[in-house]
Amino acid sequence: MIEKTRFNQQQNCWINVNTTQEHDLKTLFATYGIDEEIIGYSLDKNERAHLDYDKTTNTFVFIYNVPNQTKIDNHYETIPMTFIIKGETLITISNDRNHYLISKMAALLKQNETVSVFGMLFNSLLMITDQFFPYVEELNLERNKVSQQLKVKTTKKNTAVAVGFRNGYYLFHLSIEAKCCFARTN
């Protein structure tokens, strides 16, 4: 499904496409002259966060990791979300696992309807980054709980829980660090 929202006195457009409708995605990309390779990025659930700019087509592509609200194997993971700026249009590519952010982005836009496409993008990225804090706090509480359990009694089960937690925490933390490094280098 393609959702279009005009903003900044009708000068800009925000288009969200849900990847469950791959045909809509291909049609939209053809309309805007966006490279087929970007479709591949947008559909890849394991795509790493990165930034691309194509001078010839004046297309800005940003893949950003966002929190998955559902725990997988007792830990949180991140999932990619695609942002594309082409002219005065911001295109977001969402899926069922990150679509919860679209309503939050719409609320941000209602608060400031005169924002530019880059302003909309950066406001959205800040909001998405804020979404990580509750998960980090929850993970820290769980880490402390597991640590206390290990101090009381070390069992195979407690050790396995600690190792599993450590691995999940590490992967989630890597995603956050990647955002910090990206922000510092660009």
Image (cartoon, rainbow, N blue to C red):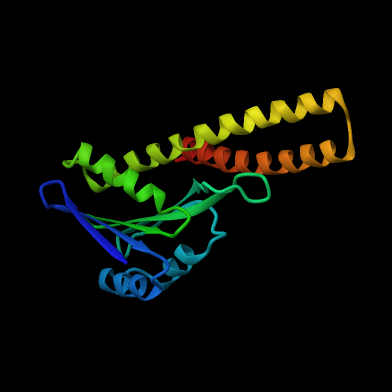
Q: Residue at x 54, y 59 (%)?
A: 47
- Residue drawn at x 70%, y 30% is 143
Q: Residue 139 in the image: x percent, y percent?
A: 62, 33
What is the x, y in percent for residue 178? 55, 42
Where residue 104 sits: x, y (%)? 34, 43
Position of 118 with respect to 133 (left or right) is left
> Can residue 16 be seen in this snapshot?
yes
Which is nearer the eye, 74 or 46? 74
Q: Give 173 or 55, whichever is nearer the viewer.
A: 173
Disc tally is 0
| For residue 16, side relative to residue 169 (left or right) | left
Q: Nearer the viewer, residue 133 or 115?
A: 133
Residue at image coords 39%, 37% = 126
Q: Residue at x 32, y 48 (%)?
A: 103
Q: Is residue 21 above or below residue 52?
A: below
Q: If the image is split into quadrants, where does the N terminus sit?
A: bottom left
Q: Residue furthest left?
A: 9
Relative placement, left or right, of 119 versus 66 is: left
Q: Is residue 112 above or below residue 77?
A: above
Q: Quadrant of the C terminus?
A: top left
Can residue 121 be seen here? no
Q: In which image quadrant can residue 83 be found?
A: bottom left
